[in-house]
Image (cartoon, helix red, strand yellow):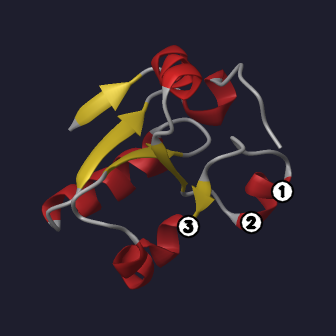
Amino acid sequence: MKELTTKEVQALLENSEPNLIDVREDDEVAAGKIPTAKHIPLGSIEARMNELDPSKEYIMICRSGGRSAKAASFLESQGYKVINMTGGMMAWEGEVE
């Protein structure tokens, strides 16, 4: 599984529009998420993966990097191109909404 640090994801956001998926729970996202991230809780990934385009690459985000790694591993096994953001939102220093 490919991984990027929060700093690498921040750099990507400055130069492009990567597809970000936040897999945290509703209450965690309510406390702040990366503005362009799509919220799909980890428990809903399997049911909602039809919302994702298999030809695109997605960066998975959670609180610390563990749940996003689970989501990335599952999606990768289904043929999706995914990257896990290590450190999660605990390490994120960029903008949140």
Check contact, mark 2 vs mark 1: CB within 8 A: yes
| Mark 1, secondary structure of its residue | helix
Q: Amino acid at mark 3?
A: Ile
Q: Residue at x 26, y 62 (%)?
A: 74
Check contact, mark 2 vs mark 3: CB within 8 A: no
Q: Is residue 61 above or below residue 43?
A: above
Q: Residue at x 44, y 48 (%)?
A: 68
Q: Nearer the viewer, mark 2 or mark 3?
A: 3
Check contact, mark 3 vs mark 1: CB within 8 A: no
Q: Is residue 70 above or below residue 3?
A: below
Q: Which residue is label 1 attached to?
A: 30
Label 2 – label 1 distance at C-alpha:
6 Å
Q: Amino acid at mark 2?
A: Asp
User: Total label count?
Assistant: 3
Residue 3 spot, x, y in % from top left: 32, 29
Residue 40, numbered circle: 3
**Side of 94 where 79 appears, left or right:** left
Residue 4, numbered circle: none
Check the picture and name the quadrant holding the N terminus: top left
Q: Amino acid at mark 1?
A: Ala
Residue 64 spot, x, y in % from top left: 56, 35
Q: Earlier in the sequence, mark 2 or mark 3?
A: 2
Q: Residue at x 50, y 65 (%)?
A: 42
**Side of 58 where 80 appears, left or right:** left
Q: Which residue is label 2 attached to?
A: 26
